[in-house]
Image: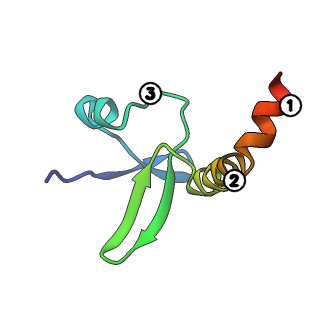
Amino acid sequence: MSALKLTQIGNSVGVIFPKELLARLKVEKGDTLFWTEAANGVTLTPYDPELEEQLQAGRAFMHEYRDTFHQLAK
């Protein structure tokens, strides 16, 4: 575990991420991070959890109607 220090950035407060953490998250300057509440604090991820739920619903729909999609693709 490492500590991250909060710093003043204009009228806001920000945190500087070390390069190793950015590489692990597979993000770079300008990317968006999403946070969600977890049992022991918060979870920080580059993936939008709401989008993931929508993708899972779409995958389930496509799986349910896979024969129909296959016929339409002909």
Residue 53 falls left or right of residue 18? right
Give the residue pinned by disc 1. 72
Query: SS of the residue at dot 2?
Result: helix
Image point 75% across, 48% down: which residue?
Answer: 65
Q: What residue type is disc 1 on?
A: Leu
Q: Residue furthest top?
A: 74
- Decide: few, some or many residues near mark 1? Use Cα within 10 Å; few <14, some 14-19, many ≥20: few
The answer to whether residue 29 is above or below residue 56 is above
Q: What residue type is disc 2 on?
A: Glu
Give the residue pinned by disc 3. 28
Give the residue pinned by disc 2. 64
In which quadrant of the rendered image does the C terminus lie? top right
Query: Percent position (x, y) of residue 51?
Result: 64, 50
Picture mark count: 3
Query: SS of the residue at dot 1?
Result: helix
- Decide: few, some or many residues near mark 2? Use Cα within 10 Å; few <14, some 14-19, many ≥20: few
| Mark closest to the chain's N terminus, 1 or 3 | 3
Task: Give whichever of 12, 68 is nearer the camera.
Answer: 68
Q: Residue furthest bottom?
A: 39
Query: Percent position (x, y) of residue 55?
Result: 64, 48
Estimate the spatial distance between the alpha carbons at disc 1 and disc 3, rounded to whole Å.
41 Å
Estimate the spatial distance between the alpha carbons at disc 2 and disc 1, rounded to whole Å.
14 Å
Image point 30% across, 29% down: which residue?
Answer: 23
Image point 48% across, 64% down: which residue?
Answer: 36
Residue 62 falls left or right of residue 30? right
